[in-house]
């Protein structure tokens, strides 16, 4: 096949690939508050939605009320992320624990993300347009974020 015939085929294949990869995931408003490493998750997404975006996940079922999914070594300053999905219904995501490598000033990072603590002097709490509260706090080298989704561990 001549190069003049291959060019349109190659361009069409490339365009198809680019369009397929650029399908943006629509995330709810509260997802903007999540640490940047969690750019493809949101509270309330089902375990099935998570696996559609991230692939099949190994699940820890130690606790009867939740399913734990670990993402090891996602890159950058993050050592791992642990996600908590409710064990019932659509299995919604309601908490994520982002663990940073030693040497990262996690408290400063949290203040950059959320400003000065506005709840209990060391935590952050924000209402969401989705009807639940977004909460965050620092524990050791981790930023913990969660949503008070109805029917989950942290529901109000």
Image: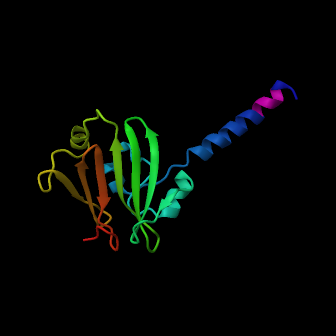
Q: Is residue 88 left or right of residue 130?
A: right
Q: Residue 125 location in percent, x, y?
A: 21, 57
Q: Is residue 107 above or below residue 137?
A: above
Q: Residue furthest top?
A: 3
In the depicted view, which residue is nearer to us: 51 or 66?
66
- Locate the C terminus and report the quarter of the image it occupies: bottom left
Horizontal and vertical percent position of residue 133 = 26, 63
- State whether the magenta stretch is mostly helix, strand or loop: helix
Image: 83 above or below 35: below
Quarter holding the N terminus?
top right
Q: Position of residue 61 (x, y in %)?
A: 45, 65
Give the magenta-colored segment's residue range: 4-8
Q: Residue at x 41, y 72 (%)?
A: 64
Q: Magenta includes 6? A: yes
Query: Is residue 44 or residue 26 the one in the foreground?
Result: 44
Which quadrant of the structure image shows residue 127?
bottom left
């Amino acid at each position: 096949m001549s190069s003049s015939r291959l060019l349109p085929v190659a361009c069409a294949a490339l365009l198809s690939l680019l369009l397929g990869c650029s399908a943006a995931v629509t995330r709810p408003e509260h997802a903007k508050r999540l640490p940047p490493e969690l750019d493809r998750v949101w509270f309330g997404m089902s375990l099935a939605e998570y696996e559609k975006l991230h692939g099949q996940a190994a699940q820890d079922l130690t606790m009867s009320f939740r399913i734990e999914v670990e993402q090891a070594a996602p890159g950058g300053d993050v050592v791992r992320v642990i996600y908590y999905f409710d064990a019932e219904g659509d299995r919604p995501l309601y908490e994520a624990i982002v663990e940073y490598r030693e040497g990262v000033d996690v408290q400063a990072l949290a203040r950059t993300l959320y400003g000065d603590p506005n709840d209990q002097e060391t935590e952050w709490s924000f209402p969401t347009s989705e009807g639940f509260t977004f909460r965050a706090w620092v524990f050791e080298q981790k930023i913990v974020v969660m949503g008070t989704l109805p029917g989950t561990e942290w529901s109000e």
